[in-house]
Image (tube, helix red, strand yellow):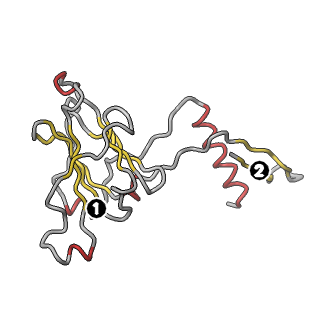
Amino acid sequence: MDLCQVFLTLALAVTSSTFSGSEATPATLGKASPVLQRINPSLGTSSSGKPRFTKCRSPELETFSCYWTEGDNPDLKTPGSIQLYYAKRESQRQAARIAHEWTQEWKECPDYVSAGKNSCYFNSSYTSIWIPYCIKLTTNGDLLDQKCFTVDEIVQPDPPIGLNWTLLNISLTGIRGDIQVSW
């Protein structure tokens, strides 16, 4: 596939999803890597009535946000009734000094506000690209859902804004063409 076909495919894919009214689907947490599953095999999907993670997304590898559902329990719909905690694996240098690869301390979400309702935002000071994170939802100390991932697994860039393409020329056979894509 030549470069023109790649750009045309990209332009058509983005414009069809951008203008059809559908939203881009951020990376979901259902596919943890096999390595992370071996590290924490207890990861599972909670039932539909319980609060659970719906997605985590990083637009640029420097920050990320995680989102969850409230579930069916009306008591869990009040602000602050569900907490997100996270732990991350220590770097190789730090891991050599301690007995366990994972931090012993679960830390609470640093920012429940910036990414919107039922979310946790991790700014660049909390984000480490290649270090695995485990996150969990709790209420009154009870575990509701838990997932593990690395930031590179949840990258989904923002779609281009104001995407335009122009057909510059077309071959005599009509099979090939040059396009200019701008945003």
Point out residue 159 in the picture as x, y percentages from the top left corner.
56, 44
Residue 33: quarter of image? bottom left
Q: Which residue is mark 1?
A: 34
Q: Which residue is mark 2?
A: 180
Furthest-top residue in this view? 74
Compared across the picture, whether 86 is left or right of 115 comes to left
Residue at 24% x, 54% y is 134
Instruction: Specify the amino acid type for callout 2.
Output: Gln
Point out residue 34 in the picture as x, y percentages from the top left corner.
28, 61
- The number of numbered discs placed on residues in the rendered structure image is 2
Residue at 71% x, 47% y is 182
| Nearer-the-camera pick, 169 or 112 | 112
Residue at 72% x, 42% y is 164
Relative to 107, residue 137 above or below: above
Relative to 34, residue 8 above or below: above
Residue 20: quarter of image? top right
Instruction: Classify mark 1: helix, strand or loop.
Output: helix
Relative to 116, residue 75 above or below: above
Instruction: Specify the amino acid type for callout 1.
Output: Pro
Point out residue 108 in the picture as x, y percentages from the top left corner.
22, 47
Instruction: Classify mark 2: helix, strand or loop.
Output: strand
